[in-house]
Amino acid sequence: MFSKKPGESSPNAPDAAAAPLPLKSGPQREATPVMPARKPVMRPEVVRSARDYSHGSAGARDDHAYRGYSGEGKKLIVGRDIALSGQISSCEKLVVEGRVEANISQCREIEVAESGTFKGEAEIEVAEISGSFEGALVARELLMVRAQGRVTGSVRYGRLEVERGGQINGDVQVYSAKASNDAADADGE
């Protein structure tokens, strides 16, 4: 039905008469030298985040502020370039990336980012300080001071972790629930 005329070539078929294209002539590139294999770099152990510790010794809580808590619905984040002043209560976690001057009560955790500054009083379960904290801090369960973190003032802690470069200045003592209750009883008399 369809036939080719002698001397015609199909547009899709390679032309037998077509010669291969010549390669470019010019200076030849030298082979790239092979880089020697790098030695593995020794890195320090990766430090866990505070939330990895938070369900340790205080798994079952008697405090009414923590009953019925589910998820991260009670999280307060103070972003960069934001300043907050006042009283903060009943939040599960406070994240400070800006500046906060406040007293914290009935909260579980505080995280001060590298860009954050906190001034005031905080009595909580877990504190992770990467920025600056000034005032009275009671971390009943764990206080973690990261490499860029600075804590100044009265400090009480259940367990303490300080990365190389982290700083704590002031009155620093291990937290004791008994000593805390005795002090509260003395104030009540």
Image: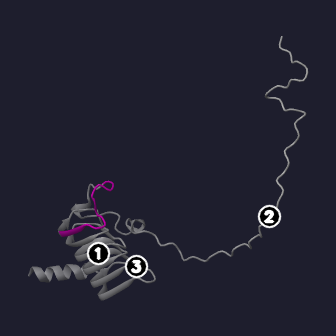
Of labels 1 and 2, earlier in sequence is 2
Kindly report the distance in space between the C-alpha atoms of the residues bearing marks 3 and 2: 49 Å
Render colour scheme = one colour
Three-letter amino acid code of the residue under disc 3: Gln
Report the residue at 85% width, 48% height from top.
22
Closer to the camera: disc 3 or disc 2? 2
* Residue that mark 3 sits on: 148
Task: Report if residue 148 lies within the magenta region.
Answer: no
Q: Residue 80 at x, y = what percent?
A: 31, 67
Three-letter amino acid code of the residue under disc 2: Arg
What mark, if any, has residue 160 been given in the picture? none
Q: Residues within 10 Å of mark 3 (few under 14, many from 20)?
A: some
Of labels 3 and 1, earlier in sequence is 1
Q: Residue 108 at x, y = what percent?
A: 28, 66
Above-or-below relation of 15 to 137: above
Closer to the camera: disc 1 or disc 2? 2
Q: Hey, which quadrant is residue 88 in on the image?
A: bottom left
* Residue that mark 1 sits on: 117
Q: Hey, which quadrant is residue 20 in on the image?
A: top right
Three-letter amino acid code of the residue under disc 1: Thr
Kindly report the distance in space between the C-alpha atoms of the residues bearing marks 3 and 1: 12 Å
Q: Secondary structure at mark 3?
A: loop
